[in-house]
Image (cartoon, helix red, strand yellow):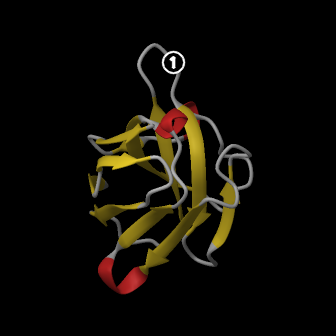
């Protein structure tokens, strides 16, 4: 059973930065797509970024491309989301997700992922 634990959320002013971490455990095969999603109050959960662990291929939502960077540290079983130039509209609960797959290419929706962390809150003030 894959377990995911997020950390690193907090409150920052617009233009600031945060780095989220997702510690993964319980899997023996590296063929996982790891994703970051977010959900603001009253809105649906949306994909932010994802990375295919075996080769490091990354994908980003247009709203965060150029500001957010997803990366991995395989030795620490951790996936990161570096968030720079944060905007008030980035305020949301951020979730880490994982799914066994042969590619991340088609896995963009929450329904595509079976394993989820508990979430970490990000608040960006103007």
Image quadrant assignment for residue 111 = top right
Closest to the observer, 110 or 7: 7
In the image, is 28 to the left or to the right of 102? Answer: left
Residue drawn at x 41%, y 80% as measured from the top left: 73
Indicate the position of residue 40 as horizontal and vertical percent values.
45, 26
Most foreground residue, 91 or 47? 91
Q: Position of residue 49 (x, y in %)?
A: 59, 53
Q: Is residue 80 left or right of residue 23?
A: right
Using the image as rendered, state which of residue 8 and residue 29 is in the foreground. Answer: 8
Visible residue check, residue 93: yes
Tell me what residue is drawn at x 54 percent, y 71 percent.
53
Question: In the visual, does 120 lie left or right of 56?
Answer: left
Q: Which residue is mark 1?
A: 43
- With respect to residue 40, does 95 lie above or below? below
The secondary element bearing badge 1 is classed as loop
Figure quadrant of residue 21:
bottom left
x and y percentages locating residue 63 in the rendered image: 68, 43
The answer to whether residue 103 is visible is no
Q: Is residue 116 above or below residue 26?
A: above
């Amino acid at each position: 059973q894959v377990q995911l634990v997020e950390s690193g959320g907090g409150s920052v002013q617009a233009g600031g930065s945060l780095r989220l971490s997702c510690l993964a455990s319980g899997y023996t095969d590296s063929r996982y797509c790891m994703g970051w999603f977010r959900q603001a109050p009253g809105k649906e959960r949306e994909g932010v970024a994802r990375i295919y662990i075996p080769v490091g291929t990354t994908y980003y939502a247009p709203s965060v491309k150029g500001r957010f960077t997803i990366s991995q540290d395989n030795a620490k079983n951790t996936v990161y989301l570096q968030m720079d130039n944060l905007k008030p509209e980035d305020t949301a609960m951020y979730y880490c997700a994982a799914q066994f797959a042969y590619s991340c290419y088609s896995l963009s929706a929450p329904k595509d992922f079976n394993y989820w962390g508990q979430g970490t809150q990000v608040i960006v003030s103007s």
